[in-house]
Image: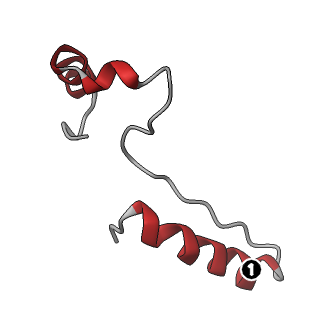
């Protein structure tokens, strides 16, 4: 099931609250680039090409 990052966070928090009472952990993986100082190079065309070149999914 693929969800957008904004929709998946509340869903994961809900599942964590429900299943946490039974000592079941809930995790999520959000794919893509998160904007930070270190990832700002991905905004340039050369940086974007590099990032896409090392990713298996080939999308940002």
Task: Give SS at disc 1.
Answer: helix
State which quarter of the image contains the N terminus. Answer: bottom left
Residue at 23% in and 17% down: 50
**Residue hosting label 1:** 17
Residue at 47% in and 69% down: 8
Left or right, residue 58 beside residue 13: left
Left or right, residue 5 beside residue 26: left
Q: Can you give x and y, in whole percent of width and height, for residue 54 in the image?
A: 27, 22
Q: Can you give x and y, in whole percent of width and height, for residue 25 in the image?
A: 72, 66
Q: Can you give x and y, in whole percent of width and height, for residue 10 in the image?
A: 57, 74
Residue at 44% in and 36% down: 35
Q: Quadrant of residue 59?
A: top left
The foreground one among 26 and 47 is 47
Asked if 45 appears above or below 8 in the picture, the reply is: above
Residue at 70% in and 74% down: 16
Q: Quadrant of residue 45?
A: top left
Asked if 6 appears above or below 38 in the picture, the reply is: below
- Neighbor class of circle 1 (other Cα within 10 Å; few <14, some 14-19, many 20+) is some
Q: Quadrant of residue 22?
A: bottom right
Q: Can you give x and y, in whole percent of width and height, for residue 23 in the image?
A: 82, 73
């Amino acid at each position: 099931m693929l969800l957008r990052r904004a929709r998946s966070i509340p869903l994961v928090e809900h599942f964590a609250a429900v299943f946490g009472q039974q000592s079941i952990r809930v995790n999520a993986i959000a794919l893509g680039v998160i904007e930070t100082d270190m990832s700002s190079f991905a905004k340039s065309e050369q940086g974007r090409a590099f990032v896409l070149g090392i990713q298996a999914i080939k999308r940002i």
